[in-house]
Amino acid sequence: MRSLKMVDNLRYMLAMELMHGAQATDMRGDVALGKVTGPVKAAFRQVIPYLSEDRNLSRDIADAYGCIKDGRLLRALEEADA
């Protein structure tokens, strides 16, 4: 049970890192993403929009966690890497 909880916590951490990474590449503007990272970011942005103004991030974190847990980002990665 402890291992399952650790994996679940890692999903939350990954969700927040993805939010930061996607925001950073959007703000930078001139970042060329790769064959896999571009489609994965696009799939992520379908769930979590660009943060253009202050908002409560609790919902974004939960939605990002959800797209990791349900495998949407993994499917996007596998399709891009095929």
Image: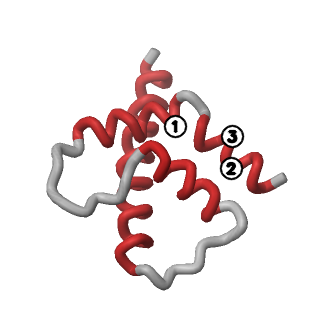
CA distance separating discs 1 and 2: 11 Å
Q: Three-letter amino acid code at disc 2?
A: Leu
The x, y position of residue 54, in whole percent, is: 15, 56
The x, y position of residue 16, in whole percent, is: 35, 49
Q: Earlier in the sequence, mark 1 or mark 3?
A: 1
- Give the residue pinned by disc 1: 68
Q: Is residue 82 above or below residue 28?
A: above
Q: Is residue 55 above or below residue 26?
A: above
- Give the residue pinned by disc 3: 75
Q: Is residue 44 left or right of residue 16?
A: right
Q: Residue at x 60, y 54 (%)?
A: 40
10 Å crowding of disc 2: few (<14), some (14-19), many (20+) = some
Which structural element holds mark 3?
A: helix
The x, y position of residue 46, in whole percent, is: 49, 47
Where, by quadrant of the figure, is residue 27 drawn? bottom left
Foreground residue among 26 and 77: 26
Q: Residue at x 28, y 58 (%)?
A: 51
Where, by quadrant of the figure, is residue 58 drawn? top left
Which structural element holds mark 1?
A: helix
- Give the residue pinned by disc 2: 77
Q: Three-letter amino acid code at disc 1?
A: Ile
Q: Is residue 71 left or right of residue 1?
A: right
Which structural element holds mark 2?
A: helix
- Is the Cβ of the residue at disc 2 closer than 8 Å to that at disc 3? yes
Q: Residue at x 78, y 55 (%)?
A: 81
Residue sticking out furthest to the right: 82
Foreground residue among 51 and 17: 51
10 Å crowding of disc 1: few (<14), some (14-19), many (20+) = some
